[in-house]
Image (spheres, rainbow, N blue to C red):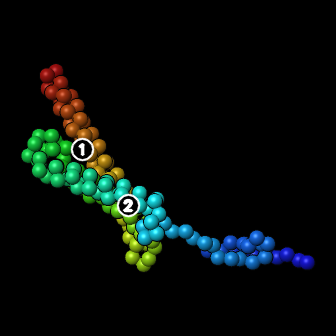
Amino acid sequence: EQESCTVCHDCFKPDTKRSMCVPKLVEQFSIVKGDSFSVAVYVISIIGIFCNIFVMVSLIKNSNTPIVKASSPQLCYIMLVSLMLLLTAPILMVSGPNDTTCPLQRYIIGIGTVIPIAVLFARTNRINVIFNRRSLLTSHVQKMVM
């Protein structure tokens, strides 16, 4: 009796005798089934979205205060919106794959990850420019004094 090995595709696995390929069973978490994991994901994501909205509203309300002005509110708004995008990604993942959610997951995760990093780089660059100007000014004043 000869045994021949065939490679199963991604959606298949070998049976117990390893004689043929059988479809893999894919378990999808779903809020409809009442899985505790998917309910927890929804609750945590929604709480995070509401916290972001609360912070954004408080930033808008107090936009004339010196602390908000010093923290560059435009960058804060961009950061909060991108974090809200990231918080919607788990909701899309738990809701199940279909023609709309699959591409949206990729774009939301990509855009939601890149934007906060860009905002952090912009803030770091801004602080760097401020401190380098100060050192350039002091060296220029020192040259004028000597």
Q: Quarter-wise, where is residue 137 in the image?
A: top left
Residues packed near mark 2 inside 10 Å, few (<14), some (14 to 19) or many (20 plus)? many
Circles 2, 1 touching at the beta carbon (< 8 Å)? no
Q: How far, Cα to Cα, is label 2 from label 1?
A: 37 Å
Q: Is residue 82 left or right of residue 26?
A: left
Q: Amino acid at mark 1?
A: Arg
Q: Is residue 146 left or right of residue 118?
A: left
Mark 1 lies on a secondary structure that is helix
Q: If you read the primary sequence from the N terminus, does the residue marked by circle 2 or circle 1 appear first?
A: 2
The residue that disc 2 covers is 42
Q: Quarter-wise, where is residue 129 in the image?
A: top left
Question: Closer to the observer: label 2 or label 1?
Answer: 2
- Name the outermost residue toward the right: 1
Q: Position of residue 26 (x, y in %)?
A: 57, 70
Residue at x 82%, y 76% (from the top left corner): 4
Give the label on residue 72, or none.
none
- Residue 73 to residue 89: above or below: above
Foreground residue among 96 and 116:
96
- Residue 51 to residue 105: above or below: above
Q: Is residue 65 left or right of residue 123?
A: left
Residue at x 32%, y 61% (from the top left corner): 85
Can residue 81 be seen at all in this image of the molecule? yes
Where the N terminus falls, by quadrant?
Answer: bottom right
Where the C terminus falls, by quadrant?
Answer: top left
Foreground residue among 119 and 3:
3
The residue that disc 1 covers is 126
Q: Position of residue 133 (x, y in %)?
A: 20, 36
Q: Amino acid at mark 2?
A: Tyr
